[in-house]
Image: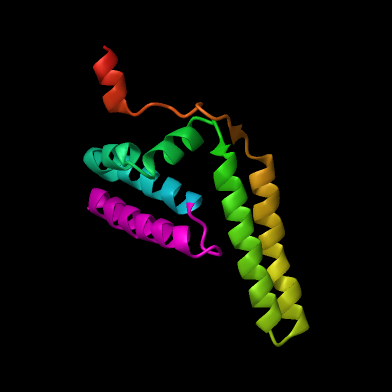
Amino acid sequence: MKKTLYNIVGTLALLLGIVGIFLPLVPTTPFLLLASACYMRGSRRMHEWLLNQRHLGPYLRNFQQGRGIPLRAKITALALLWTSLTISMWFAPLPWVRILLLIPGIAVTVYLYRMPTLEPGGQMPNQADQIKRE
């Protein structure tokens, strides 16, 4: 029963993380980390799949190992975040809503600034590459 619940929550978190790739105000990394943690407890197969997934796996592995986020990802995230926030502020009818929109923008900016930047070529090889070398 617990494993099923972990797998359901992991799948929902994974879906929200994927949505967050396309919607700047929805965080991607926390949902992917939650999905990874849930799959680790609910399904070893799903956890391995997520970590070895072609697009999301390297980001998760680098983040979980404290290696950081690529500079390009930081710049893209901040550009999309502040573009969407600026547009939202432009259309927000109430001044207090505009000010309120600054809170997540500043918080995410500070978070990304404090996160280590992954050096080019510093990406961890996937497990298939490691097996080939052995």
Q: Position of residue 33 (x, y in %)?
A: 44, 46
Q: Quadrant of the C terminus?
A: top left
State the scheme by which the image is colored: rainbow
User: Is residue 34 shown left or right of residue 120?
Assistant: left
x, y (%) of residue 76? 57, 52
Residue drawn where x is 61% and y is 61% of the image? 81
- Left of 91 or right of it: where is 47? left
Q: Nearer the viewer, residue 117 or 2?
A: 117
Image quarter of residue 49: top left
When asked about the image quadrant of residue 124, the answer is top left
- Residue for point 37% across, 49% down: 35
Q: From the viewer's side, name the closer residue of 15 and 80.
A: 80
User: Residue at (48%, 54%) from the top-left corner?
Assistant: 28
What's drawn in magenta, residue-wise? Answer: 1-28
Return the x and y of residue 111 as percentages of the image width and height: 65, 47
Is residue 44 left or right of 65 when viewed as pictured? left
Q: Where 55 sits versus 122, above or below?
A: below
User: Disc count in the image?
Assistant: 0
- Residue 122: x and y in percent read 51, 26
Report the residue that reaches farthest toward the bottom: 93
56 drawn magenta: no
Main secondary-structure element of the magenta-colored stretch: helix
Q: Nearer the viewer, residue 43 or 73?
A: 73
Residue found at the far top of this picture: 134
